[in-house]
Image: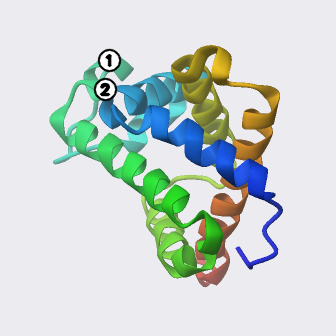
Amino acid sequence: MESGMPLSGRQRALIRESWQRVSGSPEQHGLVLFTRLFDLDPDLLPLFQYNCKQFSSPQECLSAPEFLDHVRKVMLVIDAAVSHLENLSCLEEYLCNLGKKHQAVGVKVESFSTVGESLLYMLEKCLGTAFSSDVQEAWSKFYGAVVKAMRQGWDTLPEGD
């Protein structure tokens, strides 16, 4: 997430503007994101266990208070990244550690593409006609930079950990 991030000033403005419209209802919009995520990859459901409880369905998971806390945290991370669009490198260590945490609970790097697809779906559903191809491209590049930083968490763990 070096300063040479491939986002133009216009793309940063599009991200900020679209996020402002979404961030007012983070739990509601986060649930759209995770509902889509489980639709696309139901095998991710077992990764969400709280107090050793296994959810029998995505609906059960999506309504659990512990999961709703996770939804709020995910939306806060997106909010922090949007707030630091001019200088994402200041979040690099945080995102790297977040990557390590996700790896530790069994998330596969490949799942981030499904999360990205779910994020774009949520933005499209929440923004309606304001979700243009320019907005989609800006968010795709932005999400790619965030994932790149999180992947460093995978790359820094020794084999076998």
Q: Position of residue 114 (x, y in %)?
A: 65, 37
Q: Is residue 40 left or right of residue 9?
A: left
Q: Position of residue 88 (x, y in %)?
A: 61, 71
Q: How many marks?
A: 2
Residue contact at pointers 1 and 2, CB within 8 angstroms:
yes
9 and 29: which is toward the camera: 9
Q: Secondary structure at mark 1?
A: helix
Q: Amino acid at mark 1?
A: Gln
Give above or below for 94 relative to 115. below
Residue 111 visible, this angle: no
Q: Position of residue 101 (x, y in %)?
A: 44, 67
Give above or below for 26 relative to 156. above
What residue is drawn where x is 56% and y is 18%? 125
Give the residue number, with chain letter if any, for mark 1: 59
Q: Secondary structure at mark 2?
A: helix
Using the rendered view, name the quadrant where residue 96 is placed: bottom right
Give above or below for 36 relative to 156. above
Q: Amino acid at mark 2?
A: Leu
Residue 132 visible, this angle: yes
Q: Is residue 76 left or right of residue 1?
A: left
What residue is drawn where x is 58% and y is 29%? 123
Instruction: Judge the density around disc 1: few (<14), some (14-19), many (≥20) Cα neighbours within 10 Å.
Output: few
113 and 145: which is toward the camera: 145
Q: Is residue 71 left or right of residue 156?
A: left
Per the model, the C-alpha gap separating discs 1 and 2 is 5 Å
137 and 146: which is toward the camera: 137
What residue is drawn where x is 59% and y is 31%? 118
What residue is drawn where x is 41% and y is 44%? 47
Q: Position of residue 119 (x, y in %)?
A: 58, 35
Quadrant into which the N terminus falls: bottom right
* Rendered image: mark on residue 62: 2
